[in-house]
Image: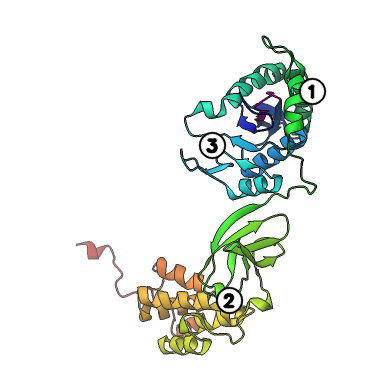
C-alpha cells in the first residue's frame, strides 16, 4: 500500500512509436515516458524524441502539470538523464534533476539497480500503457510529435477512467479522494530548464564553455567551478555561490567583465609579459613572435598567458632549436599562433629546412643541377 500523494513513479516504455516527417519522408522513433501515482495508479504518458536530460526534464514538467500538483517523492528508473551514479545505497541524481526537485519542493528517491520492487507501480503501469494506448495506435500514421501526443492524451483519459477488473472504481475515481487532496501545489513560477557543467578556471582567467570563453574573478585561477547553462544567462558558481554571470554566446570569441581582471595585473605563476618576451627573445626572433602574438591579440594581456606558457612548455619538450625552427616555419606560412607551432612540432615538420634558392636561380626560375642523377649506365 502507498500513502496518498507520497510517490510518483517514473519509467519509459520499451516499444517506440514511428513518426513520419511529411516533408522528407523520414521516419523517427519517439520514446514513451510514463509516470504513475502510487496510491491511485493515476497514469500519465507522453512521447518525446529521446530520453535525454532535456527531454526527460520537459516530460516531468508536463506530467506534474497534468497531475495538477506534486508528490512528496519522485521515484525514477536509473536513466542517465535522471541518475548520474546508479549505486545501490547512495544513488546520485544529476544536478539538473536535483534543481527541478528543489523548484517543485519534492525529493528524488531513485530505484535501486536490479530491484524491480522499488518501482513496482511503474513496472505495472508500463505494460498497461503499452496495451491500452500504444497497441491502439499501432495502425495509425503520425506526421508530428504533437499529433502523436494528442492521440495519447485521448487514450489516457479512457485508461484512467477504465474500471478496474477486481477492485471497484477506476484510476480517476481513486485519484479524486486520495492523491488529489494530498498533492503539494505547483509553484507559481515556471521551472526554467538548465544544464550543469564543471570547469576549471584557466591561468588566464576564463573558462571555456561550448567553444566560447567566459571570464571569472581572477582570484579563482586554478579553482574548480560549476556552470549553470540556461536559455540566458550563463552563471558560474564556486562553492555554491554565484561568482559570475554572462549572456550566452555561440562558439568563438570571448566575454570579459572588467571587474574580473586583477587590479595590479599580477602575472600568474610569477610571469609578467616583460619576462615572457625576454625569455622568447633569448630563444630567437621566431619564438619571440610566437609569444608577442597572443599578448597583443587578446583584449587583455592576461588572456594570452596560457598560450605563452604553452610555448614555454614546447621548449621543454622539444628543445629551443626545434622550437625556433617550428616558429620560423609557422611565420613563413602566416600562422604564428601557439596551436600552429605545436602542430608543426607534433608532426615533425620543423625538421626539413626552409627552401631558400640562390638569388640568380630564383630570379631566372631555373632548377638547381642534380649531382646524384642516375642513368642507364649507372646500373652496371
Residue 305 at what x, y percent from top left?
52, 78
Residue 163 appears in the figure: yes
Residue 179: which quarter of the image?
top right
Q: Give yes or no for residue 39 being in the magenta stretch.
A: yes
Q: Which residues are magenta?
A: 34-42
List the single residue furthest toward the top.
166
Question: Gap between marks 2 and 1, in whole Å?
Answer: 56 Å
Residue at 62%, 42% (x, y): give it. Answer: 107
Q: Earlier in the sequence, mark 2 or mark 3?
A: 3
Q: Earlier in the sequence, mark 2 or mark 1?
A: 1
Residue 243: which quarter of the image?
bottom right
Nearer to me, 289 or 230: 230
Mark 1 lies on residue: 154
Element carrying mark 2: helix
Q: Name the disc covering residue 78, or none.
A: 3
Residue 78 at what x, y percent from top left?
54, 36
Tell me: residue 276, above or below residue 226: below
Residue 227 at what x, y percent from top left?
61, 60
Residue 358 placement, left or right of 80? left
Q: Residues within 10 Å of mark 2 (few under 14, many from 20)?
A: many
Residue 312: which quarter of the image?
bottom left
Element carrying mark 3: loop
Disc 2 + disc 1, Cβ < 8 Å? no
Q: Residues within 10 Å of mark 1 (few under 14, many from 20)?
A: few
Q: Give yes or no for residue 276 being in the magenta stretch.
A: no
Nearer to me, 272 or 37: 37
Mark 2 lies on residue: 218
Quarter holding the N terminus?
A: top right
Residue 355 placement, left or right of 244? left
Amino acid at each position: 500500500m502507498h500513502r496518498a500523494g507520497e510517490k510518483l513513479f517514473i519509467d519509459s516504455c520499451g516499444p517506440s512509436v514511428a513518426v513520419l516527417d511529411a516533408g522528407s519522408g523520414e521516419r523517427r522513433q519517439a520514446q514513451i515516458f510514463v509516470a504513475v501515482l502510487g496510491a491511485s495508479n493515476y497514469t500519465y504518458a507522453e512521447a518525446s524524441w529521446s530520453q535525454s536530460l532535456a527531454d526527460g526534464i520537459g516530460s516531468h514538467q508536463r506530467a506534474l502539470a497534468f497531475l495538477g500538483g506534486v508528490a512528496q517523492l519522485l521515484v525514477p528508473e536509473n536513466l542517465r538523464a535522471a541518475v548520474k551514479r546508479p549505486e545501490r545505497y547512495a544513488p546520485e541524481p544529476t544536478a539538473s534533476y536535483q534543481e527541478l526537485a528543489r523548484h517543485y519542493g519534492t525529493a528524488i528517491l531513485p530505484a535501486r539497480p536490479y530491484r524491480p520492487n522499488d518501482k513496482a507501480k511503474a513496472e505495472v503501469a508500463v505494460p498497461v500503457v503499452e496495451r491500452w494506448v500504444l497497441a491502439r495506435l499501432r495502425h495509425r500514421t503520425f506526421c508530428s510529435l504533437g499529433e502523436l501526443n494528442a492521440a495519447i492524451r485521448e487514450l489516457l483519459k479512457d485508461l484512467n477512467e477504465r474500471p478496474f477488473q477486481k477492485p471497484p472504481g477506476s484510476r480517476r475515481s481513486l485519484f479524486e479522494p486520495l492523491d488529489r487532496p494530498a498533492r503539494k501545489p505547483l509553484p507559481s513560477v515556471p521551472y526554467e530548464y538548465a544544464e550543469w557543467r564543471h570547469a576549471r578556471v584557466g591561468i588566464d582567467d576564463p573558462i571555456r564553455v561550448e567553444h566560447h570563453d567566459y571570464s571569472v574573478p581572477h582570484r579563482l585561477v586554478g579553482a574548480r567551478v560549476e556552470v549553470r547553462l540556461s536559455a540566458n544567462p550563463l552563471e558560474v558558481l564556486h562553492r555554491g555561490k554565484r561568482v559570475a554571470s554572462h549572456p550566452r554566446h555561440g562558439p568563438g570569441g570571448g566575454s570579459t567583465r572588467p571587474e574580473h581582471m586583477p587590479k595590479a595585473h599580477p602575472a600568474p605563476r610569477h610571469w609578467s609579459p616583460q619576462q615572457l618576451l625576454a625569455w622568447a627573445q633569448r630563444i630567437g626572433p621566431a619564438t619571440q613572435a610566437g609569444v608577442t602574438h597572443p599578448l597583443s591579440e587578446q583584449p587583455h594581456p592576461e588572456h594570452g598567458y596560457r598560450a605563452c606558457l604553452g610555448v614555454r612548455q614546447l621548449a621543454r619538450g622539444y628543445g629551443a632549436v626545434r622550437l625556433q625552427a617550428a616558429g620560423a616555419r609557422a611565420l613563413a606560412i602566416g600562422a604564428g599562433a601557439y596551436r600552429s607551432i605545436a602542430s608543426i612540432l607534433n608532426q615533425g615538420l620543423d625538421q626539413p629546412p626552409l627552401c631558400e634558392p640562390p638569388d640568380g636561380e630564383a630570379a631566372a626560375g631555373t632548377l638547381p643541377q642534380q649531382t646524384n642523377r642516375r642513368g642507364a649506365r649507372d646500373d652496371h
